Amino acid sequence: MNANKSNGVSIGARRAIAYIVLILLSFLCLFWFYVLFINATRSNGELGRGFTAIPSTHLIENMRNVFHGTLPMIKGMRNSLVISSFTALCCTYFSVMTAFAIQAYPFRGRQAVFSFILAIMMIPTQVTALGFVQLVNKMGLENNFIPLIVPAIASPVTFFYMKQYMEANLPMSLLEAARIDGAGEFFIFNRIVLPLMKPAIAVQAIFSFVSSWNNYFTPALILHKEHVKTLPILIAQLRAADWLKFDMGQVYAAIAFSIFPVIVVYLLLSKYIVGGVAAGAVKG
């Protein structure tokens, strides 16, 4: 009886500690969003006087300055949405296709191909940036979205995650049964494999979308005309304005405006995250 009580107390204590840690981590994560939205309601002069936890009354003014300023923020939002959406779509679809090819077909050199794809993860984007920009210029694709979308097809990190998820959740017997019934390979992939991979696809779509949405380095090298620039570039231009035009309240309002699509995408797909991450983990 005492042992049961002590086990119950121990379990309760561990649960209490876990909740305390989770609440603390949640607070640390959400506090900076709170700071961002509070600062978006303050004027440049108020921001210069230091931080306060109480919202001010300049949110509408700051948002008006963002939308009706010299920079095309609405077009930047549209450009970022187009690039990020197609990037997430191409990245997830072709990564699943590549993982399916290596997982389902026992061809010679399969392990070598798998190792080569993983080795690409070790190459930083900055190393290949100069050659990439030269190639884009020679192809006449400067100020075009294509160089920002098509390379997303080759995503070793997403491929590795999809491969691990398939190993844990894709039964080969199901594929063999479909082949016996006369189904073609594309039918099997699109109608059987993709629905089974939905949790993993949702997780990686969020990561791919957010990564592309926040990407400043590559778009800044390719997009130079105002009407094709993405939000990170335009926000950087706001921050780089001369001291006569610089308005930190407007910068905070623009940043707050830019994270709303990311929050919406997360809310739409978040129910898949826990299951997708757990099922796609490396098997012990």
Image: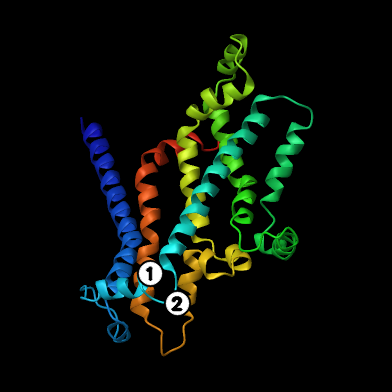
Residue at screen point 25% across, 48% down: 16
Residue at screen point 49% across, 53% down: 82
Q: Earlier in the sequence, mark 2 or mark 1?
A: 2
Q: Secondary structure at mark 1?
A: helix
Q: CA distance from mark 2 to mark 1?
A: 9 Å
Name the amino acid, label 1. Ala
How far across and down, in percent of the image, does residue 259 sit?
A: 38, 60
How far across and down, in percent of the image, does residue 109 sit?
A: 78, 32
Say the numbered circle drawn on residue 29: none
Which residue, as the protein is rendered here, is positioned at the far top? 181
Name the amino acid, label 2. Leu
Instruction: Tell whether label 1 touches label 2 (CB within 8 Å).
Output: yes
- Residue that carries the numbered disc 1 in the rendered image: 254
- Considering depth in this image, is 33 or 242 the residue closer to the camera? 242
135 shown above or below 45 = above
Q: Is residue 250 left or right of residue 100?
A: left
Say the numbered circle drawn on residue 238: 2
- Quarter of the image with the C terminus in it: top right
Residue 96 occupies which quadrant of the picture? top right
Residue at screen point 36% across, 39% down: 271
Q: Is residue 284 visible?
A: no
How far across and down, in percent of the image, does residue 195 sit?
A: 48, 28
Q: Is residue 109 left or right of residue 244?
A: right
187 shown above or below 130 = above
Q: Secondary structure at mark 2?
A: helix
How far across and down, in percent of the image, does residue 74 sit?
A: 41, 64
